[in-house]
Image: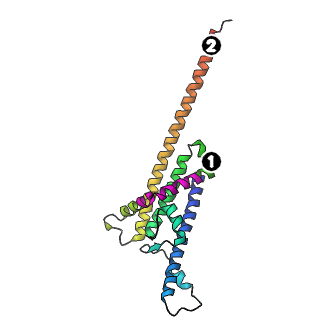
Amino acid sequence: MNRQIQSLLFLSILLLSFLSVLNLASAQNETNNSLTNNTSITRGVDLSSTIGKIDFNFDRSIQVPEKYQIPARILFGIQGEIPLQLLIIIIGVFICLAVLISEILKSMPFANEGLQRYAIAFIVTALVGVSGAILEVSTFFLNLANMFNILSKWPALAVVVALGIVALLAYGLSIIIRLIEHKTGLAEAEMKGRDVAQMNAEARIIKETRIP
């Protein structure tokens, strides 16, 4: 369980850092565009205008910079402009899916090592992201949170509700995965016990029927 929390925190920090970089780059692009259109540009640029634009207004859209479009497409299946609230949900879905895949890989002998399992889970999740499935699922959860336009006036609350739905679903799936693994382990242990009992019975029969 501690390893699960560590992996979840690591992926969260990694992907939230990527989100912050996108947000900063988008704000910087907006500042550069406004400075380019301004005919009275001075050599000393006030960075406070850029910092002021780095916010988490959930109604705004982020334009993925060109140099980040490849990792954004690989990780999340997105390119170009995307609403900030949808991007946050995509990150949440990505993290939950990676954790679930790492749970499934525990039962596979070729990928049950800690670092190796996390790396494979990350790669598999990225492949799912390339297909656009994570984007579609995230859009579905966002629409579900905005059902009947109840939360349309509170986009931040809609994001929280959508992430809550994703987290609850992931938690339920993780419980199911652990139950399946537990039952599979019991079945394997029972089968091994039967094999040992059969071998002991055969050995006893051979011993009893052996001619003195």
Q: Residue 68: image x %, image y %?
A: 54, 69
Residue indicated by mark 1 = 113
Residue indicated by mark 2 = 206
Residue 87's place in the image compared with 115, above or below, is below
Instruction: Read off the magenta span.
Output: 118-137
| Residue 92, visible in the rendered structure | yes
Furthest residue in direction bottom, as rendered: 40
| Residue 54, visible in the rendered structure | no
Residue 127's place in the image compared with 72, above or below, is above
Residue sitting at x 48%, y 88%: 37
**Of the image marks 1 and 2, the number of the one nearer the N terminus:** 1
Badge 2: how crowded within 10 Å, few (<14), some, or many (20+)? few
For the stretch drawn in magenta, the main secondary structure is: helix
Furthest residue in direction left, as rendered: 148
Q: Residue 177: image x %, image y %?
A: 49, 45
Q: Secondary structure at mark 2?
A: helix
Badge 1: how crowded within 10 Å, few (<14), some, or many (20+)? few
Residue sitting at x 51%, y 68%: 69
Question: In which quadrant is the C terminus drawn?
Answer: top right
Residue 96's place in the image compared with 178, above or below, is below
Residue sitting at x 39%, y 63%: 142
* Callout 2 amino acid: Ile
Q: How far is mark 1 from mark 2, CA to CA?
A: 43 Å
The image quadrant that residue 188 belongs to is top right
* Callout 1 amino acid: Glu
